[in-house]
Image (cartoon, helix red, strand yellow):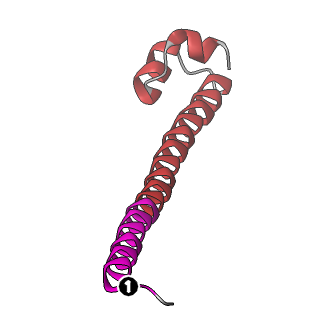
Amino acid sequence: AKFSPKEREAYEESLKYYRDIKNVVDTSKEEGIIEGRIEGKIEGRIEGRIEERKEIARALKRNGISMEIIVKATGLTIEEIKNL
């Protein structure tokens, strides 16, 4: 390009500014994706554990185990166990 030295310097500065901003945005996006995956895994594990407790409660309930013991064994409330 046929820039004067001053124009060339301004152009180079604008490119540097653009690249800096782009890097910040790209890094933020990557961090957000990673954070979302981690949160999703944690939520999935929690939901899996709750479902496992409910399955255990169902099995104990089918076998005539008292509500008191089921509550202690699973950590579920009596209302949750009744609704199974």
Q: Main secondary structure of the magenta part?
A: helix
Q: Outermost residue, bottom direction?
A: 1
Q: Position of residue 77 (x, y in %)?
A: 49, 14
Q: Can you give x and y, in whole percent of width and height, for residue 57 in the image? A: 58, 28
Query: Quarter of the image containing the C terminus?
Result: top right
Q: Quadrant of residue 62?
A: top right
* Residue 38 belongs to magenta span: no
Residue at image position (36%, 79%) is: 12
The residue under the point 32% across, 85% down is: 5
Which residues are drawn in magenta?
Answer: 3-27
Give the x, y percent position of residue 25: 44, 60
Left or right, 34 with reference to 57: left
Q: Is residue 1 above or below residue 46?
A: below
Verify whether residue 15 appears in magenta: yes
Name above or below for residue 14 compared with residue 71.
below
Front residue (pair 23, 39):
23
Residues 26 and 9: in front is 9
Crowdedness near tag 1: few (<14), some (14–19) or many (≥20) residues, C-alpha within 10 Å: few
Q: Residue at x 49, y 40 (%)?
A: 46
In the rendered image, residue 47, in percent from the top left (x then y), is placed at 55, 38
Q: What count of labels does the image hold?
A: 1
Is residue 11 rendered to the left or right of residue 62?
Answer: left
Relative to residue 43, is residue 54 drawn left or right? right
Q: Which residue corresponds to the image point at 63% horizontal and 12% vertical from the top-left? A: 82
Amino acid of disc 1: Ser
Q: Nearer the viewer, residue 83 or 41?
A: 41
Provide the residue designation for mark 1: 4
Q: Say which element carries label 1.
A: loop
